[in-house]
Image (cartoon, helix red, strand yellow):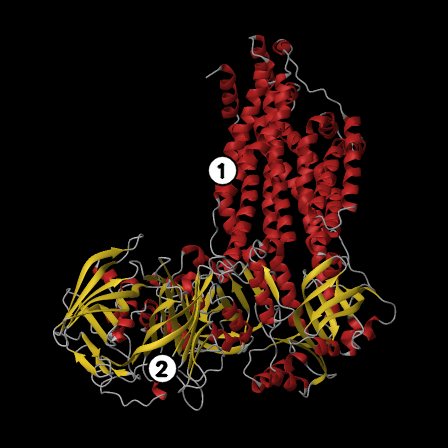
Amino acid sequence: MRCSARTKCSALIVLAAAAVGCDRTAAGPAVSGVSLGDVLGGRGADATGFARASEPPVLHFPADHGAHPAFRTEWWYVTGNLDSANGRRFGVQLVFFRQALAAAVPARAASLAARDVVLAHAAVTDVDGRVFHADERLARLAAGLAELQGPAFGLRFRIACNEWSAAAAPGGDGFLPLDLRAGGRGFSFALRVAPGKPLVLQGEAGLSRKSDEPGNASCYYSMTRLPIDGTIRVGGAEHAVHGLGWLDREWSTSALGPEQVGWDWFSLQLDSGEEVMWYRLRRRDGSIDAHSRGSFVDAAGAVAVLAPDAVTATPAGTWQAADGGARYPARWRLVCAEPAFDLEVTPLLPDQELRVLVRYWEGAVAVRGTRGAVPVAGRGYLEMTGYGRAK
Amino acid sequence: MSLLWRQGLRYHSRHALQTLLTLTGIALGTALLCAMQLSQRTAERAFDLALEAVAGSATHTVQDGPRGLPVQGYVLVQRALGGRGVAPAIRAVARVPDRPERTVLRVLGIDPLADVELRPWSSPAGAEHESLPLGPLLTTPGGFVATAPLLQRLGLGPGDTLRVTLGGRPHVGTCLGVLAPPPLVAAGLEDVLVVDIATAQEWTGRLDRIDRLDLRLAPELLPDGMTEQAALAAVAAAFGPGVQIVAAGANRGGLAQLARGFRINLRALSLLSLLVGAFLVHETMRLSVAARRPSFGVLRALGARPRSLGVVVTLEAAVLGLFGSLLGAGLGVAFAQVLLDPLARTLNDHYATFALHGVHVDGAVLLLGVLLGTAVATCAGLGPALAAARVPAREVLVQHHHEPRRRTRRQLWAAVSAAGLALWLLLTAGAGLVQAYLGVLAMLTAAVLLVPAAMGCLLWGAGAGVRGAGPFVRYVVRSTAAARDHLALPVAAMVLAIAATLGLATLVGSFRDSVAGWLTQVLPADVYVSVPGGVDERGSSVLAPEVVAALRTAPQVAAASTYQRTRAMLRSGSGEGEVELVGMDPTPAVLASFPFLVAAPGVAREALPRGEGVWVSEPLAFRWQLAVGDALTVATERGAAVLPILAIYRDYGNERGEVLAGKAWFDAHLRGGITALALETKPGTDVDASLAELRARAAAAAEQDVGIRSQRELRLGSLAIFDRTFAITGVMRLLCLLVAFFGIYSAFATLQLERGAEVGLLRCLGARPRQVGLLVLGQTALLGLCAGLLALPTGALLGHVLAEVVNRVSFGWSLLEVTVPRTAMVEAVLLALVAAVLAGVQPAVRFARMRPADGLREA
């Protein structure tokens, strides 16, 4: 469900709120106070003319790796835990969002006219250097400022925002292997994401419901274990790296309901060859939303859906940036009866907050615990949003 | 309070009228100075804010003249610089046909998504505080936002539509919301429709181009390891050669540079008015010292030291100056409001389109005005203070006072030296405006120094003239002549004030005649066609080819000249920069009528159409010191082209100068459509009647708002702009006259007041009250006449210097003919007479009513 969760992207919220129109009251409070829910829930924003996710989608690959312009929002989300040859650890994140500003626009002659914008976030967690780097790019989908194409008609997939890109390499299925290029102040990376375990349809055969209202749902699939190779440059030094990645794809027009204020999202890869995805939707009153969901993928790739009451996620401690701001949980414990696991989730660095247009926490984590009765370790990524408002 | 101070206070409170007049004089002078400064600062600030609102916090701007930049280059730069601190913009001028009250608006096309670093108010980050409706702005063709004051002026709310024309082509804008940027930015956006860059592309018809690219090359925004130099190289590489990368701040104070001549001229005027104020203070203090000599003598006898007396008088002057200039500072704000409107119109006519609403009251300007006013008054009081310090203690015993200084010879020498200095300064002024003004100052000083001698001659002549008249008339003339040393200074002040107004009248009148003459010369065709727009575009909007074709083939039209106006980088001699360049395809009539100042013999007219050279306008030739035969290098898309200058022509239309080239050469080297047409109708055509047909023809050919005007309309329109431009000079002149009048009135009124003894004696000798009144009026009238007559040559000379030196240095053009307008001469003499007679009324009445004994005692 990274879906709704992810939509938060500050700027997207801003854009979507702005897309509502000039009547600010209709868009809710000032942008900094706009929650996911306000935007994804589609309140105020006119969803007329956009497709809604209400049935499990019929997906065709590789075409569905590409854009779904009938939906308002869509993203390509890659995270990874990587090691250099001399044992240096890195976390890496690169995400591209596409956001439609209107369902339909008249044909226009201007080369810079656009219906969609592309927003991208990139981050590198330099665990040994104890530095977290993050940056963002934002551009209209026009004239090559941002690009989005394929995979179809012999064109390989490519999404780009300014100089950042995720582009399918020759010789694959038009999507994987995927070459990622991004960089900002103090960091850059060039990575290749290779095919790995088969993709997983999240929710009900790819339909991930976020609230009771029909249509408040997204199409969501994941690739939970993908080999990644390449180079990361931090602090002026280049490191050849290798490791495992996780790719999420999600598109929707509206998802969250009005009472949902934030989420905690886990993507964990266990040494046992199994993966856990869990998202926990939080409600305005502090309770956990009944639409929280997850999945458990075994070593062979078989998927089990995790129901809302299946997993107990308990936060422990808090962390807050030096300049104040949101107060995030510092650690987590995830406990599930069936399949049985009890996992401690600990950030590799406390400060992995992206201080971009809108702030949120997303970073590499270490996993330690038991699977059944057997001790297990692992790595993963954790995203926490909506804590600003709770404060 | 010491005795010294009290006597001063008593004197000034007893002579309240005189003190009030002095205060008024100083106040008016200071007010004028402050008003000029305030209104100019307001204009410059508005211009800079407008620039900054557009440029944001850019460190550099990339431009390529009117062609603009290709979007692909922008994309390359965006990628090369890592997508940070790079923002495109398109600027244009829109007319609003439905709103007569404010017809011209600026349009600013931006990319809010790229503006995070440069124009935070428009970016999503800024949207946190303002409700910029990004989605609709990007996806609604013609969508715009504007500040609340502008929307209010236009009577618009969100959702309303507004018809605009850009480059004559109609578009419909839709108001999407209210722009609420930080106050300083808002001030720069007061007349701006903010649109998405795609809408701006569509409105300007340049679908794959942008106007400029603003860069913020800060270390924290550049990619790792990239230096500013490397970034600039990357930018240059993205756009190819010929592109201009201008460092920010190069344009700051741009208006001050644009309108430098204009500004300095106005400042000089206001300083002159303060000078007149200084004369007033000097006069008042001098008279007050003269009147208090006995008291000072007593004080000296009681032990007051000379220095104390001097200090007291100086301080009195300073206090007068302080109060007067404080009053003036307040008055200046009101005056500035009066000046703002003509100033705004002038600047909008000639320099740049920007909004100007309400005076920005700058405390520094007011403070400076007060300081200057006080300082000038204090300085003016120094002379009298010295006189006070020199009063001997025995003065109390000796009944007569006098300042017996006969300095005619020394003054003459000083006058001759000042005149020599003036001549040298004016002849070598070159392009130095300040030097030209110093020359004018020296010239006026010489004139002032000559006043006593000239007055002597005039009064001697008058004395000779009235030899046969009755004793009363002779008494009037001779008594005035006898007191001429005493009277020289107020007369000199009056001469100066009146000469200044006469000089200005000469300048404006001659200039207007020259422009009118020039207009008839350069407009040989019958009908002129161009796209109406703001001054920023300066007629560079391209006429639709369909319109051109339709008009050229109209049945009434016999021949047509075409003009393609663009801007190009030029270099020659001592100059280099972007200059307007016009490709011209002239008819023989247009070719023959061009008003050459200097031309290569024989070939100049024929060689231009063949592309063998260019013609350069006088202001450019003056500024860059170009001569016929010099080579001019033009940066073209195919590299540099070198052309000889064939001729220099008279042009009052563009003080920045321009260059004319043949159409064939233009088409081969530069790009740009036809921006203007000059149509010659067939013999026997009724031009005014054919205008409607031509307009209908143009309207049918293409959807473009085209200005089609007869030669007569164009000429009158141009003269109307000229008159508007000098309206501000007119206002200034009026204010100057006011100061002058107060000066004269005050000086003469006080002058008469000290003549109580003489009048008392006359009464004792049997003069009747009416005769005494007439005597006073006769004397002041005589003095007024003197001043008026002396002001004539001074004013005429000043007019010539203003027209031939200052005007040329300021704008680079010479005038066809300089003549002193007769009406202004009559006006000057009348003004002097009326002011002098009015000044005499109060003393005349007073003396007529005075008991003779009181008069005698007053001495």
The one of B770 and B492 positioned closer to us in this rendering? B492
| Relative vertical location of residue B419 with respect to residue B623 in this rendering, above or below | above
Q: Which mark is residue B361?
A: none
Query: Are the two marked residues, 1 and 2, in contact with CB atoms closer than 8 angstroms?
Result: no
The one of A369 and B125 positioned closer to us in this rendering? A369
| Relative vertical location of residue B521 with respect to residue B304 in this rendering, above or below | below
Q: Amino acid at mark 1?
A: Leu
Residue B813 in view = no
Tell me: A37 left or right of B201: left
| Pointer 2 chain | A
- Residue B196 lies in what quarter of the image? bottom left
Q: Amino acid at mark 2?
A: Pro
Tell me: B171 left or right of A117: right
- Residue B581 lies in what quarter of the image? bottom right
Kind of element beneath mark 1: helix
Tell me: B354 left or right of A239: right
Could you classify mark 1 by the number of other residues whose Cα lies within 10 Å: few (under 14), some (14-19), or many (20 or more)? some
- Residue B770 lies in what quarter of the image? top right
Residue at the spot 71% in from the left edge and 44% down from the top edge = B435
Could you classify mark 2 by the number of other residues whose Cα lies within 10 Å: few (under 14), some (14-19), or many (20 or more)? some
Give the residue pinned by disc 2. Answer: A195
| Pointer 1 chain | B
Which is more foreground, mark 1 or mark 2?
A: 2
The one of B97 and B625 positioned closer to us in this rendering? B625
The one of A123 and B213 positioned closer to us in this rendering? A123
Q: Position of residue B534 (x, y in %)?
A: 57, 67
Q: Residues under labels 1 and 2: Cα distance? A: 84 Å
Give the residue pinned by disc 1. Answer: B327
Q: Position of residue B741 (x, y in %)?
A: 61, 40
